[in-house]
Amino acid sequence: RRVRRQTIRNEMKGHHLHPAPPPPDVDVADTGVVVGDLRLRPASEAPPPPSGGPGPGPASTPSATAPGDGAASGPGDGEVDALRSLEDLRSDDSQCRALAARRLPSIAAAIGPERTRDELLPFLCDGSDDDDEVLEAVASSLPGLIPHVGGPEHVVCLLRPLELLLSVEEGAVRDKAAEGAVRVSASLGDAEYASDYAGMVHRLAAGEWFTSRISACGLLPEGLPRLRTGGQRRRHVADFAGLCRDPAPMVRRIASRNLGKMLYAVASVEGAPCLLPADGGGGDDGDGGVSILPLLDLYEFLAGGDQPDSVRLHTAENCVQFGRAASLLLSTAGDVMSDADPDEWTPTIDVLVRRVLPLVVATIDDRSWRVRWTAASKFADVVKAFSGLTGAVDALVPAYEKLLQDPEAEVRTAATYNFAEVAGTDASVTDGDPSSGPDARVSVASRLVGRVPSLVEDDSENVRAALAEVATGLAPALGRDGTVAHLLPPLLLLLRDGRGEVRLNVISSLSRLGDVVGPELLAQSLLPAVLDLAEDGRWRIRLAVIGQMSLLARELGGAFFTDRLVAMCAGWLGDDISSVRVAAADNLRELTRRLGSRWSSSNLLPRVGEMLGHPSYLRRAGAVRALGRIASAMDAESASWEALPGVLGAASDPVPNVRFVAARALGEAGTAVGKDVYGSQIVPVLEMLGGDPDRDVRYFAGVAGRELREHFDGQREGGGDAI
C-alpha cells in the first residue's frame, strides 16, 4: 500500500497543479517560488505595476491576471501561506500534508473558484489513497469549500471527493466524510439534491466494497425527508432494505443501528398513511407513499436469533425509535381516519405493539449477555416511548422484572440504574400477584417496589450501589404511606451495608426522601444510621454526611438539630482530612444562613471559639476558617461583635499557616461588616499582615485587601501591595 501511495504521489507531481517549467527568459534563482501556476515573489522584491496590456513574461500569464483566480501580484501574508500550503499537499511528509489539508478553505480562497473546481478538487480525488490522517483532514475541510466553489450552482462538485472518502477503509475518515456530505447536501437545491446527492447515496448503497455500503446506511435515513416524490422515497427505502439484508455482517450491524431512524423518518414524512400497504405505483416520479410495513419485516429479520450479537444488540434502541414513531402516528392518525373508512386502515397503530414489543421482550432471554445488557440500559427509554400505547406497559414491566433477576451482575446493575425512571411511569399494570385476581391493577411503582428487598441482598456490590443511588427516587411515586411501609426498611439496610459506596449513595440522595416522608419520620428512622456514618472510617463517607447537614437542619428544625447534631458539626473542624475540615467550615456557613445569626451566635461560635486555643495549628486554622465563613453569612452587627474578634486575634498567631488563613478569613468576614468596622479594625490588621515575613501571608493579605477595596469602594488596583 505504501508503494502504491508513493507511486500516486509521484504521478501527482506531474498533475496540472505542479509548477510548470519556467520560461527560458526567467531566472528561477531570482524570481521566488512557483506554486502551481502562481508565482510568489520574494518578500524583498516590490510588486511590479499592473501591465497595461498583453505582453511577454510572467506578469501577463493567464494565471496571474485571470479574473477570479484570487492571486494578484504581491499577495498578502495569508495568501502566501495558503499557496505554500498548496505546495505542501504534495509533500512526502504525511503530517505536512495533513496540516495543509486542514487549510483547504484558505487555499481555495487564494486560487479562486474556477481553479478550485477545475484543479484543486480533481487533485484531491487523485489522492484518495493517501494516509488516513490526511484523508480525515481533507474530509473535515471539504465542507469549508462551499463558499469558495463559485456559488450554489457549483456546490455539487464537492460530492465527488466526498463519495471517494465515503468508500475508504478507515472508519474515522468515513464518519468525517458523512458529516461533510450532510453539510454539503444542506446547500443543494431540491433538484440537485434529488439527482446528484441521492444518486451518490444510491451508488454507495450498491457499491462493490462493503465500506461504501456502511456509509450509505447512515446517509439514507438522513436524506429521506428532503426527497419530494413518493417514488424517490421508495427507492431510498428500497436501498436501505437491501443493506439490512446485506451478506456482510458489518453492513447489517450499521443498518440495524439506523433502522429506527429510518422508520421515524418515514413516519414523520408520510404520516398516518404509511400504515397502509404501499400501492407500488407511480414509478420513481410518482406520488405514491412509502409504507412502514417492510421496515417492520426488517426489524423482525435483524432481531432474529440467527443474526450476530453485534446486530441484535440494537433491538432495544430501535424499539425506542419505533415507540416515538408510534406516538407520532397516533397523533396524526385521528385526523386522517375521521375522513376514511376504518376498514381500509389495516394494519393500525396496534401493529407496532403486536409485532415490535414481542421482539424487545425476546431480548430479555437472549443468549448473549451483551444484548441483554443493552436492553437493560435502554429499558427506561423503551418504557417511556411506549407508555402511551394500549397494553405496552403490561408487556414491558414483567420483562423488566426479569432483567432485575438476570444471572449476570452487569445486566442487573444496568437494569437497576433504570429503576426509578421505570417506576415513575404514569401507567397502571396488573398486580402480578395471583391472589389479587387477573383484573387487579396497580401503579408501576407499587409493583416494582416489591423487587427492592431482593436487590438489597444482591451478591454484587455494584447492584446494591446502583439501588442506593436511585431507590429514593421511588418515594414521590409511592407517596408517604407507601414509602414508609416499603422503602424505608430497605434503605436502612443499605445505610448499614458493608461497602462504603453503597452507604455514600444513600446519603447523597436523602433530599428526595425528606420531601416525601417529612422531618419527624426522617429523624426517627434514618437519623441514628446517619449519626453512625458521621464517624465512619472512610473520609468520603464523612464528607457525604456533611453535605446532608443543611438538609437535615431544614427538615428537623433548629431545636432538634441543636440537641442532636450541632456538636458533631463543630467537631468535624478537627478532622484529620483537609477536605473534611474545609467542608465542615462550609457547612457551618450554610447552617448559619438557614437557622439565622442568633442561633449561630448561641450554638456555633462558642464551640468554634474553644478551638482557637488548641495546641494543634491545624485545629486553630480550621476554627479561623470557620469563623470567617460564619461571619460572611451573618448580619453586620453579629459579624462585627461575635465572629470578627476571633479572626483578628488569629492574625497574631505564631504559625504562618494560621496567619494566612486569618488573612483569607478577613476577606470573607469583611464583606459582612460595615464600612466603619472595615476601616477601623480590618485595615490595620491587613496592613500588619502585608508586612509579614512570610510571603504567603503577605500574598493572601494583599488579595483580601484588594477584594475588600472593590467591595467597599469599587476601586480596582493591581500590584502586590497589601492595601
Image (spheres, rainbow, N blue to C red):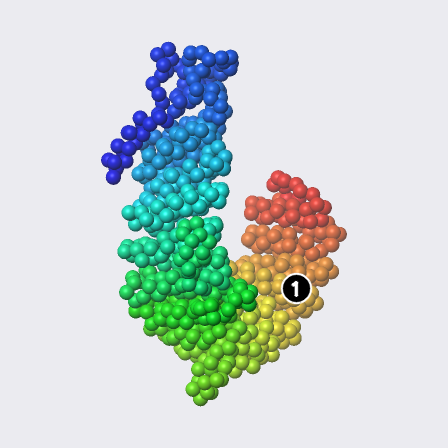
Write the residue at 37% across / 66% down. 373
Of residues 326 and 709, the one nearer the viewer is 326
Please indicate, yes or no, whether residue 121 appears anywhere in the rendered image: yes
The percent coordinates of residue 24 (x first, y second) are: 35, 12
- The total number of labels drawn is 1
Q: Is residue 225 left or right of residue 160?
A: right
Write the residue at 49% across / 12% down. 53
Kindly identify the amino acid type of the residue bearing the numbered disc 1.
Answer: Arg
Say few, some or many: other residues with alpha carbon within 10 Å of mark 1 (under 14 / 14 to 19 / 20 or more).
some
| Quadrant location, the N terminus | top left
Of residues 81 and 298, the one nearer the viewer is 298
Q: Is residue 648 above or below residue 322?
A: above
Q: Is residue 136 left or right of residue 155?
A: left
Please indicate, yes or no, whether residue 687 appears anywhere in the rendered image: no
User: Judging from the image, what secondary structure is the residue with disc 1 in?
Assistant: helix
Write the residue at 58% across / 54% down. 661
Q: Is residue 563 above or below residue 230?
A: below
The percent coordinates of residue 680 (x first, y second) are: 73, 51
Quadrant location of residue 80?
A: top left
From the image, tell me which residue sits under label 1: 593
